Image (cartoon, rainbow, N blue to C red):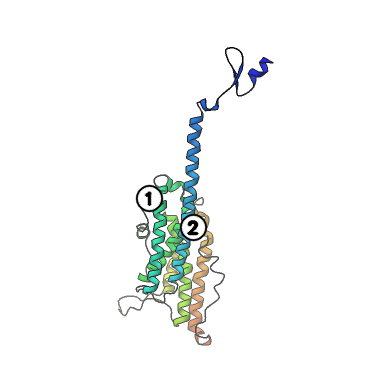
Amino acid sequence: MSGGLQDMPGMKRHHDGQPKETDSRTSPFMPMFEVFRNELDEHHDRRERIIKASRDITAASKKIIFSLQRVRSLGSSIPPKISAETQDRAAVIQQHFNTIAPDLAGINGWRYQRQVSPGIQEYTEALSFEHYLRHQKLITVEEAAATVPSNITLTADDYILGIFDLVGELMRFAITTMATSGSLPGSESTDVSTEKRDILMDLRSLRMCFHGLDTTSCKDTSLGRDSEKKMEVMNTCVEKVEAAVYGMIVRGRERPKGWVPDLSDDRGTVGSY
């Protein structure tokens, strides 16, 4: 009987032979496991904060894009009312970035890159769309990175994927503007030394650059995983603008004023990967 008690887990003997339960608080391993527990709790809390902020940034960026789709000209300032809306939402986005900037400091910037990437990509899409409407130029990765806190890294992958999604917004802007104004948006420069550039030329240039993109060496990254599908959507968007321009030139008089192609299915494909 005494041998059985001695072999029971969590029990040890006094010098008088009486069994005594071991106090788990005196185990030398407990402090170590408490440190692990605290680190895991901090990790999960940090991860949830970043995911929530990324979703809020995505939502605010989409609202900026919707507001900018009411613009009807290129290479000029944004109308005051629309500009006020976009600035308010941009300020909200900056607040969310500032909130999670400490969580993404140092090595955590890469540890949680997958959680913050959706928000950064949508923000890049909105930022590049506004930049294009103002200047009819593509924002550079350096210019885009300068608009976020220093602790937050705008990776080349997130930048390129955001520009992929920009093509869909440019397609909607081009087709809607053609329907309302009867002309393709683009440069109206009268300088004979400056080549007139319209939005279709810009979209074709983007398509050519994307086709020259080699992602075979980055299959395990977000760019490698998403580029193939985004390439298909990008090609479709450019083709829709080409078809709309063809229709405006060849069959424009047969269509009623304000006619717009059905784009109801596009929102679910462009910018959602």
In this rendered view, identify the residue nearer to me: 267 or 50.
50
Q: Quadrant of the N terminus?
A: top right
Which residue corresponds to the image point at 47% horizontal and 56% vertical from the top-left? 54
Under circle 2, the secondary element is: helix
Q: Which of marks 2 and 1 is nearer the N terminus?
A: 2
Dot 2 alpha-carbon crowd within 10 angstroms: few under 14, some 14 to 19, many 20 or more: some
Give the side of residue 270 with respect to residue 68, left or right: right
Q: Which residue lies furthest to the top in this view?
A: 16
Under circle 1, the secondary element is: loop
**Is 23 placed above or below 168 here?**
above
**Is 83 placed above or below 9 here?**
below
Which of the 4 image quadrants contains residue 182?
bottom left
Which residue corresponds to the image point at 39% horizontal and 63% vertical from the top-left? 90
The CA span between labels 2 and 1 is 19 Å
Q: Determine which residue is flagged by label 2.
A: 55
Q: Which residue lies furthest to the bottom in this view?
A: 253
Q: Nearer the viewer, mark 2 or mark 1?
A: 2
Disc 2 marks a residue whose amino acid type is Arg
Image x and y of residue 177, in percent: 45, 78
Q: Determine which residue is flagged by label 1.
A: 151
Image x and y of residue 153, in percent: 40, 52
Disc 1 marks a residue whose amino acid type is Asn
Which residue corresponds to the image point at 47% horizontal and 43% vertical from the top-left? 42
Please state the total of marks drawn on the protein image.
2
Image x and y of residue 157, in percent: 45, 55
In this rendered view, identify the residue nearer to me: 149 or 204.
149
Instruction: Give the label on residue 58, or none.
Output: none
Which residue corresponds to the image point at 66% horizontal and 15% vertical from the top-left? 3
Does residue 171 appear in this view?
Answer: yes
Dot 1 alpha-carbon crowd within 10 angstroms: few under 14, some 14 to 19, many 20 or more: some
